[in-house]
Image: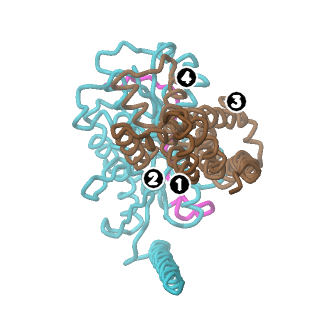
Amino acid sequence: MKLRKVTAAAAAALVLSLTATACGGDDNDSDTGSGSGGGDKIKIGIKYDQPGLGLKKPDGSFSGFDVDVATYVAKELGYKPDQIEFVETKSADRENALARGDVKFIAATYSINDERKQKVDFAGPYLLAHQDLLVKTDSDIAKGTDLNGKNLCSVTGSTSAQNVKNDIAPKANLKEYSGYSECIAALQSGTVDAVTTDDSILAGFAAQSQYKGKFKLAGLKLSNENYGIGVKKGDTATVDKINKALEKMVSDGSWDKAVKDNFGPANYKNEPAPKIGDIVQ
Amino acid sequence: MFDFLSDYDNPTLLGAFWMTVKLTFFSGIGSLVWGTVLAAMRVSPVPLMRGFGTAYVNIVRNIPLTVIILFCSLGLADIFHVTLGASDFKIQGFRLAILGFTAYTAAFVCEAVRSGINTVPMGQAEAARAIGLNFTQTLRLIVLPQAFRAVIGPLANVLIALTKNTTVAAAIGVAEAAYLMKEMIENEAQTLLIGAVFAFGFVVLTLPTGLILGWLSKRLAVKR
């Protein structure tokens, strides 16, 4: 009996100390993140699982267009590359991460829309993407209605999947997985004829070395996705600074270089750099 | 504030929860049958069957459910073309999900039933043998009826866990509650409110299950 009490107390103490240290760590990090100026760190939200846009590589480094944009913007805000800390912000958590101040801004295929604008402020847009199809190189799918009766894959709950169901091809046989990697696997095994989401994301996958030459983008412009940089609601000073940084990035050619570096191998025909505040409906 | 609840029609909120109920119902029946068969194997006098039952339970219950469900779709359907007679991905996903949930939950049902079998006194089985019943008859007529009445409580836990586990089916595109929740969160930017609505939905489903089966387990328990 006594032994059991001791064990329980020890377990409770262990749990408490673990949670306490976890909280402590978070607090310290966010303190340094929210403080502005010279020697502090900046926390930026990106995605970890989208090659070409935001990808965490096995060695812990990051690559992708969103990462390049975020790094450039941070540089203009006065942070060196080693002061940047990238944080994974999944789609469902983006608004809360900004509201809580976990991240200074988010560059993570964040399409500007009216619902989101009520919760966060957007700088940009910095890229205009379109919903598109990734098909095998020898595929003959040429327009959206070709999809009716075809097998198609997208990600559960994504805007792209909803567009297909409601507008583009309601008769398409839509398979939904929780991630794009599973869809690409299904495309490779021939179970589905096409994968659909933003062309920038698809180009990132098609540009990966193991898929080079196997897939192509169909080049349909099925929707307009204006990627913006999410900032905490009301923080107009930061929005202005980021907008200036984005303008500079386009004018000095870094923007074009970033697009070429990240999407080049997929023959991605990108739109010209969008003007700040110019949202294509 | 709650106007988003009526904005969705593919599936609707009720439709999504109805899919959750259907998944739970069919997987529940499937795993009860398959789990009972597994339990019978684990107590049978044939070493090969005992070995199979033990191996199955220990392997399947230690694989994460997400892996099992994803394997059903990515592995069975996409690579081995086991489509369970459906070419439409919606129906295919539904059937594959039930297959996966049944395979997984049966391992837990098996262990619950086996614990019930252990509550039946040895004398019962010995008496059954003495009047000339064989193994199947002993199990079917004497042991299992008593065992089941002892394990209604534990089986209720398994059923409640199964209800919540069906959310994993969203990973292969089955339009149940978690699927609709993902869709809503993608569009509405109201994570907390939407999360609360769906959490409440699951409480509505599982709380009565627990109360009714808890009451039944008290009523039907074999008093020894």
**Residue at position x 65%, y 29% in the image:** B10
Q: What is the secondary structure assignment of the residue under circle 1?
A: strand
Q: Earlier in the sequence, mark 4 or mark 3?
A: 3
Q: Chain of mark 3?
A: B
Q: Which quarter of the image is occupied by the C terminus of chain B?
A: bottom right
Q: Position of residue B72 (x, y in %)?
A: 42, 32
Mark number, residue A230: 1
**Closer to the camera, A114 or A207?**
A207
- Label the brown chain with its letter: B
Chain A colour in the picture: cyan
Mark number, residue B91: 4
**Closer to the camera, B6 or B162?**
B162
Q: Position of residue A137 (x, y in %)?
A: 29, 20
Label 1 vs label 3, nearer the camera: 3
Query: Could you tell me the amino acid type at mark 2?
Result: Ala
Q: Position of residue B5 (x, y in %)?
A: 74, 41
Residue marked by disc 3: B9
Residue marked by disc 2: A107
In the rendered structure, the answer to whether residue A99 lies left or right of residue B17 reads: left
Label 4 vs label 2, nearer the camera: 4
As measured in the structure, the alpha-carbon distance from the residue carrying label 1 to the one carrying label 3 is: 29 Å
Assess whether mark 2 and mark 1 are in contact (beta carbons under 8 angstroms): yes
Q: Chain of mark 1?
A: A
